[in-house]
């Protein structure tokens, strides 16, 4: 089994910064990609940012230039640095790890989510 644990959410004023951390552990053969999704009440879960094992990044248009994703392959961790936060960034943020398996079929493991609230 694989466990994914997030930390770092909280309440911040508009224009402020937060850093989210995520660690994957357990029976890991390889992690193809890691990243973050977010879901606000009444909305679907949307991709925020992802990073491949080779370091290729992908960002939602709404966060480009404000958020930065980074990864430590040796530690199976991923960070999301969020700057210039806006009220519309308020959501439950979920970390995922796309993990390879012995049968060759990758599987996405998810964390429990960490709340980010941007409000004055």
Image (cartoon, rainbow, N blue to C red):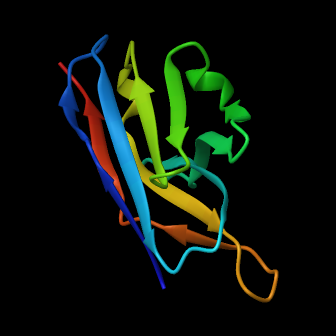
Query: Relative to residue 62, is residue 5 depicted above or below?
Result: below
Residue nearest the viewer, comparing 10 with 74: 74
Q: Position of residue 118 (x, y in %)?
A: 28, 27
Residue in the foreground of this view, choosing between 5 and 112 = 5
Residue at 66% in and 66% down: 30
Q: Is 40 placed left or right of 43 in the picture?
A: left
Q: Quadrant of residue 23?
A: bottom left
Residue 13 drawn above or below residue 47: above
> Which residue is at 65% across, 31% downward?
60
Residue 101 position by quadrant? bottom right
Q: Position of residue 94 (x, y in %)?
A: 45, 55
Outermost residue, front direction?
A: 74
Q: Position of residue 87 (x, y in %)?
A: 35, 24
Residue drawn at x 43%, y 38% is 79
Count of numbered circles on the image: 0
- x 21%, y 25%: residue: 12
Q: Is residue 26 left or right of residue 14?
A: right
Residue 8, x across and y down, in percent:
25, 42
- Seen as rendered, the residue at the extreme right is 104
Residue 41 appears in the picture as rendered: no
Whether residue 107 is visible, yes or no, is yes
Quadrant of image for the C terminus? top left
Is residue 24 depicted above or below 106 in this figure? above
Picture quadrant where residue 98 is located: bottom right
**Nearest the eye: 117 or 83:** 83
Q: In front: 111, or 43?
A: 111
Query: Along the horizontal axis of the image, is 47 left or right of 20?
Result: right
């Amino acid at each position: 089994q694989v466990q994914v644990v997030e930390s770092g959410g909280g309440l911040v004023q508009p224009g402020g910064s937060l850093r989210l951390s995520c660690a994957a552990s357990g029976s890991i053969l390889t992690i193809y990609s890691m990243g973050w999704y977010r879901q606000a009440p009444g909305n679907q879960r949307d991709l925020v940012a992802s990073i491949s094992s080779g370091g290729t990044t992908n960002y939602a248009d709404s966060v480009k230039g404000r958020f930065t994703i980074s990864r430590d392959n040796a530690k199976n961790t991923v960070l999301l640095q969020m700057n210039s936060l806006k009220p519309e960034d308020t959501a439950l943020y979920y970390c995922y790890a796309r993990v390879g398996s012995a049968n060759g079929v990758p599987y996405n493991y998810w964390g429990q989510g960490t709340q980010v609230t941007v409000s004055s």
